Structures are given as C-alpha cells and as structure tokens.
Amino acid sequence: MGPISDIDRQLFARVAASRLRGAHPLLPRLSRAADHGKLWFGTAAVLATVGGRTARRSALRGIGSLAAASMASNLVVKWTVERRRPVMDAVPLVRRLRRQPWTSSFPSGHSASAAAFATGVAIESSRYGTLVAPLAAAVAASRVYVGVHYPSDVAAGVALGVGAAALTCRWWPPRPETPAQARPRVSAPAMPKGEGLVVLVNHSAGNAAGAGGFTDAEQLEVLLPAAEIMECGPDDDFMTLLGHAARRASERAGALGICGGDGSVNAAAALAAERGLPLAVFPGGTLDHFALDIGVPNFEDTAHAVTEGDAVAVDLARATPIAGGKGTSHFVNTFSLGFYPELVRIRESLQGRLGKWPAAAVALGRVLRTATPMEIEVNGHQRRLWVLFVGNGGYSPEGFAPAYRQQLDDGLLDVRAIDGDQPLARTRLLFSALTGTLGRSRVYTTRRMRQLRLSGLHARDTRAYDGEVAAEPADALLIDKQPGALTVYRPAQPQNELLQRARTAAAKAKWWRAVLRK
C-alpha cells in the first residue's frame, strides 16, 4: 500500500471537518459531472462550436491530452501504486456518490484529466486556458472534498495531467499565438466597408456554409458591404474568374481578395504580385496554412485590416524552368517532389466517395506500399530521395515535420529531404515520427538556402505547389524567392493587446447584429 503522510491525513481531516459544518452542493455535482470525462467533452464541444479556429484547435489538444493522461493514470499508475481510498462511511455526503469498483486511490484520475484538458487548451490559447483553468481546479479540489482522494492523490494527478499535455507537443508542435514576422507595408489602400475590394469565393475549397447558417459570401457581404463579391462554383473555371476579379480590382484601383484554401491563395498571390495588387486572404479552406501564418485566422481579422489599410510585404517563392518547360510557377507555402504529389493525386480521386481525411489515409497506405525513390540532381549532386520538400521561408520546428513559420520575409528556402539510400528508410522514418525523434533520424535532412537547382526531372513531371498537384514537363528547375513581392492585408500589431481583442470583438458584434436582424 502506498504510504500516506501525516500532512495528507491532516489536510484531509480539515476538509472533512469543514464539510460536516456545512456541505457545499456545487463541488459534489461538479465531481460527478467530470465522471468519464463528460464535463471536458462538453466543454470541448462548446469551444469548438462557439469559438473560431483557435478554439477548435484548443479543444482538440485538450481532448488528446485528456486521453493520454487518463490512459497513463488508469492503465499504468493505478496498477503500479496500491493505495486504498479514504474511509469516510460516516459522512452522509459520500453515500450519495456513485458506487464504483475498487481501484487504487493514487493518483486521482479526475484530477489528471482536468489538469490535462486545461493545460492542453492553454498550450494552444492562453485566453481559453484562463477560462478553463478555474473549472479544472474546482474539479481537482472536489475529489478531496467528497472524500474519495487524499490531497497527494490530487497533486499527483495534476502533475500527471500537466505532463501528458506537455508531451503532446513532442508529436504535435503548438502554433504560436503571434503571427509570423513580415515587413511593414503602408502603401496598401484603406477601403472603408470594402470599397474597391474584389473578392473571389471558391466554394470548392472548403465548406460552403459558414457560421450562423451564412455562406462565406454572405459573411463577407456583412463585414464588407461595399466590396464586390464573386463566387466560383464546382462547374465554373476558377482561373478565368480569378483573372476577371483581378481586372476589376485594377479598374477600381483597389485590391484583390480570395476566399479559399492554400491552393486558391497560391493562384491569387501570383496574380496579385504580377499586377501589383494588395491581396486580402479570407481563410475558407481545410487547413489554411498561409492565413494562419500571416495572422488572419478569421474573416473579421482580414476585414479589419482592409478597412484600416494595414498590410505587410512577404516573400513569394517561384520555380522557374531551366530547360524543357514553360512559365514560372509560384508558391506561398511549399513545393514538393516525390511520393507526396502521388499521395495528393490518389486522395483527390477517392475523396468524392470516402471524404477527404479517410481518402488521405488510404492514399498514404498505398503510396508507402508502392512508392520507389526518385533519382534527381540537387545543386549538382546526384541524390536518391523519397521526398523533397521546399518551404517558402524557414519552417518550425526544425527537427520535426514542418508546422508553421515565424518569419515570412527571411529570403530563405527551407529544404528537407528523406534519403532513399538509407536502408529501411520508410520504416525508420515512421518509427522516428511516432517516437518524436525525427530531428535525430539519419534519413531526414534539412538545409536553409537562398536558391535550389534541380535537374534530371524528366521522369518526375508531377509536382505539388501548396498542396495542389501540377504536371510540368521541365527537366530542370531553379527555385528561388522574390523578396517582399507580395503585399498582404493583416491587422497591425497594437501596443495594447486588449485593444486588439476589443477590435476583433467589435467586428464580431457587428456580424452578429446583422445575423439577428436577418
């Protein structure tokens, strides 16, 4: 039996004495609500429904942390450390608790789950973490109050929960709450109510229905009533409509807007840079990597920046054919060769029947089973690679799968490769990813450079730009950057963080007033 200290007994006795003087009905109810994680699943559902993208990410990490802590507590520690629960049969309050089979008192599983969920939420968002933390603390305290755990059980559970949440960062690096750095640009026009802005909404990129039952186009009309909104459906030619939108923006001496995923942003960015137009990005895709890096996770953020004329200059990466190709291709996030383009091709062929994420899982299984390394020349050196990844700017974390950028105007390419000459490369790569040791794997290499020359691509005519597959016949490519070539709207960083929150809240209040009037 695990030892019980005198401090434990004294604290427990004091809590029991205070309970006998007058039971508080809220703590027992809170303790029961947390059974089997029901309270935390409900909290996560509220965050995901009411909040935005950050809230959904916080809820997801919170649930993942809870699952890890619960597994460690109930399947490992409780069966390792034997400690009986406190004997409190004389207290009527305990008789009202649900009878459960005997398990070790150490650690408190409820406390572990509560601390894990709150810490996981706080890792993604300190604001949401601050809201959840008091509830988690109350659940942990309730376990002593109702007489089923000693204080040390609760303390151990809290420590276990915090550790489990922190451990998720090894496999899923958290995205910083602050956007990536970029050069300030003051030449972007301020467009009150969106006057002069032409936005193309690509409904094929994400969900057509937005918050409150409004479509993306309807939300934009509420936020920017003077903007010209164009919509692209499944049967429309996206590039034709995008060209028309760019011409209209030039005629109005305004700006080009795009609502869609990273592939849509890629096409709009290249056209905006070519015509010297500022770009307004409204995240409407599945992942929206560029929108998150630039600092516009919600429509309200971009709308506020457009109204105020706040913008920054970012680098635009390009792949220029050296031989056997036509035209330069651009990318705002990533370029890749190898089995990733094939994975995307298979996923796109299946997602109409299976859905995007199940199709991606099936595609990954097929590619890992059938793919072969590619023989190409990289900066004059012959290489045998499974995958070549090129990022527009340095991605973080360096020793892990690329997740986010901290600077969008560094002038550098982030080049990462999986070496096909190493034995059992795929197996070793998978093992390193599962154990969080990818940065030390010999099959995974990273470099930062200003330009990259690729040749011997005649057998590799399929490439991926920002997640979109493109077929190109070029045998050789020069990949480099156009420093500060793209002007993108984003809110200015205020001196007072509360001011920024007040501005965002005001924009959301405006939107909800319109919803209620409708």
Image: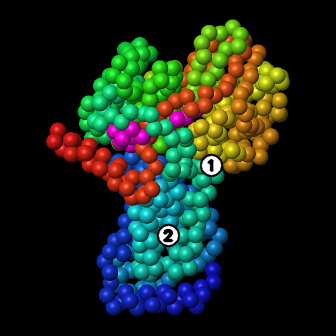
Q: Residue at x 83, y 33 (%)?
A: 423
Could you say whether the residue bearing mark 1 is in a helix, strand or loop?
Answer: helix
Q: Is residue 16 visible?
A: yes
Number of marks: 2
Q: Position of residue 297 (x, y in %)?
A: 43, 42
Q: Nearer the viewer, residue 297 or 170?
A: 297
Q: Residue at x 75, y 17 (%)?
A: 455
Q: CA distance from mark 2 to mark 1?
A: 24 Å
Quadrant in which the N terminus is drawn: bottom right
Q: Position of residue 407 (x, y in %)?
A: 59, 42
Q: Is residue 297 visible?
A: no
| Residue with the most extreme left position | 517
Quadrant in which the C terminus is drawn: top left
Q: Is residue 48 above or below residue 128?
A: above
User: Which quarter of the picture shows residue 310?
Assistant: top left
Q: Earlier in the sequence, mark 2 or mark 1?
A: 2
Q: Nearer the viewer, residue 333 or 485?
A: 485
Could you say whether the residue bearing mark 2 is in a helix, strand or loop?
Answer: helix
Q: Is residue 480 magenta?
A: no
Residue for badge 1: 171
Q: Residue at x 52, y 35 (%)?
A: 313
Q: Is residue 10 above or below residue 263?
A: below
Using the image, tell me which numbered label, if any, was put on residue 111.
2
Q: Position of residue 83 (x, y in %)?
A: 59, 78
Q: Is residue 153 left or right of residue 139?
A: right
Q: Which residues are magenta?
A: 301-315
Q: Nearer the viewer, residue 169 or 426?
A: 169
Q: Position of residue 264 (x, y in %)?
A: 46, 25
Q: What's the amino acid at mark 1?
A: Trp
Q: Residue at x 52, y 81 (%)?
A: 150
User: Which quarter of the picture shows residue 330?
Assistant: top right
